[in-house]
Image: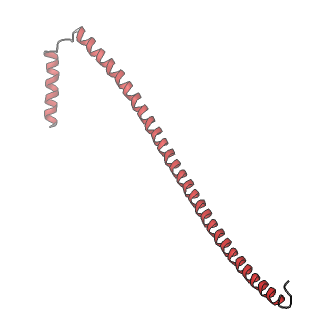
C-alpha cells in the first residue's frame, strides 16, 4: 500500500509539471469567494442560534424547576389546609360530644331535682290545708 501511494504522488507531481490545470476564470473566482463569504456568515449565524438555543433550554429548565417547586409548595399548603380542616372537624365533633354529655347530665340533674321537689312538696302539703 505504501509503494502504491508513493507511485501515485509521483505521478501527480509529474502531471502537474507537464500538463498543469488551466487557471480559474475571474467570474468563477468571484462566485467562489462570494460563496465562501456567505458560508462564513451563515456559520456565524448558526453558532449564534445554537448559543441562543442553549440559553433558552437553560431558561426552560429553570422555569421547569420553579414550576415543580411551586407545585410542591402548593401541595404542602393543601396538605396543611386539609390537616387544619380535619383538626377543626375533630374539635367540633369533640365539642358537640362534650356539649351533648353536659346537656344529658344537666337534664338528668334537673329531673332528679324535680322529683325531689315534687316529692317534698307532696310530703309537705299533707299537713297543709287547702283553701
In-image side of 31 versus 130 (left or right): left
- 50, 62: nearer the viewer: 62
Q: Residue shown at 44%/35% (left/top)?
A: 56
Residue 110 location (% of width, % of height): 74, 79
Residue 12 figure quarter:
top left
Question: In percent of the image, x 45 and y 40: which residue is there?
Answer: 60
Q: Front-most of 94 and 115?
A: 115
Q: How many marks?
A: 0
Image location (x, y in percent) of residue 70: 53, 48
What colour scheme has been applied to the protein in the rendered image?
secondary structure
Looking at the image, the residue that sits furthest to the front is 131
Name the spot of residue 47 as percent of width and height, x first. 39, 29
Q: Position of residue 90 (x, y in %)?
A: 61, 67
- Compared with 73, 92 (above or below) is below
Residue 38 is left or right of residue 119, and the answer is: left
Determine whether, in the image, residue 89 is placed left or right of residue 109.
left
Q: Compared with residue 108, is residue 16 higher up or lower down, i.e. above or below?
A: above
Q: Which image quadrant: the N terminus?
A: top left
Amino acid at each position: 500500500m505504501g509503494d502504491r501511494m508513493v507511485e501515485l504522488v509521483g505521478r501527480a507531481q509529474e502531471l502537474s509539471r507537464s500538463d498543469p490545470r488551466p487557471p480559474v476564470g475571474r467570474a468563477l473566482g468571484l462566485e467562489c469567494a462570494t460563496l465562501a463569504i456567505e458560508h462564513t456568515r451563515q456559520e456565524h449565524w448558526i453558532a449564534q442560534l445554537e448559543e441562543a438555543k442553549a440559553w433558552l433550554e437553560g431558561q426552560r429548565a429553570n422555569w421547569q424547576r420553579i414550576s415543580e417547586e411551586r407545585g410542591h409548595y402548593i401541595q404542602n399548603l393543601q396538605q396543611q389546609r386539609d390537616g387544619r380542616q380535619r383538626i377543626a372537624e375533630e374539635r367540633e365533633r369533640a365539642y358537640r360530644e362534650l356539649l351533648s354529655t353536659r346537656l344529658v347530665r344537666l337534664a338528668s340533674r334537673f329531673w332528679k331535682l324535680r322529683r325531689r321537689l315534687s316529692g317534698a312538696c307532696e310530703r309537705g302539703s299533707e299537713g297543709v290545708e287547702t283553701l
